[in-house]
Amino acid sequence: LQAVAFMAVLYPFSLLVCIYAPVKMSRIMVFLSSILCILWSVVFMVTTALVDTQPYAVLWGLSESSVSCLCLCQFPLSRPVVLRVLVLGTGVCWHSINLTLRALKGLRRAQWANMFSVLYAVPVEAFPVVWERPEEAGGGPIRWRKDGEAVQSEPAFDPFCLMDEQPESAWTRAIIAPVPVKDDSRLTVWEPYLGTLDMEIGW
């Protein structure tokens, strides 16, 4: 009953709200759409394997001299076809579960949200990535970057780029360290996140 209420009432209502406020509702709609895909994939697999057992028909016409007829053959779905359909439904369900969990992570706290189209699990708030050469090596900007230029400012690209091209790359490793926000910018769980969480990916 809850699944039916979700598919028939909650999701259409959320879709209407998304049309009114698409930016604010984007991650929520990904979350709800993934749940909808999970439910429909389960319904599809159960219907194909247990409920829909009616035979299927192939029809063709035949005409000889003055006689014409319509011929048909009835047959059920073969077991390999049903198995392939079940594998397809299982794959869709598994992918939808993964997408649901990625959306849920961003809904809990906005600064730890991951992107959906990029599969590495680095929070969006880690960008822009800024780090410099070690102090014992002279400090300053890294090779291929100028002073004041971020190492990587595009969230869709590798945050660890250029690390292997530095002279000290054989003796260094990447560290992601969270930095606490200021007391006046801490918000409750259900309030929108308005500040920035400084993250350093350094040596």
Image: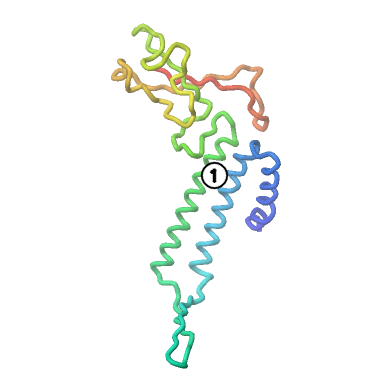
Q: Is residue 190 above or below residue 133?
A: below
| Residue for point 60% across, 47% down | 32
Q: Residue furthest bottom?
A: 66
Up the image or down, 35 lies above or below 182; here it is: below
* Colour mode of the rendering: rainbow
Q: Residue furthest left?
A: 170
Quarter of the rendering occupied by the C terminus: top left
Please state the horizontal and vertical placement of residue 184, each as a whole percent of the image.
66, 17
> Could you classify mark 1 by the number of other residues whose Cα lies within 10 Å: few (under 14), some (14-19), or many (20 or more)?
many
Front residue of this view, candidates 108 and 31? 31
Identify which residue is drawn at 65% across, 58% down. 4
- Numbered-mark total: 1
Q: Residue at x 46, y 83 (%)?
A: 61
Residue 26 position within the rendered picture, expressed as x and y whole percent measured from the top left:
61, 40
Q: Position of residue 192 (x, y in %)?
A: 66, 30
Local secondary structure at mark 1: helix
Q: Percent position (x, y) of residue 53? A: 50, 74
Q: Mark 1 — residue?
A: 100
Amino acid type, mark 1: Thr
Quarter of the N terminus within the rendering: bottom right
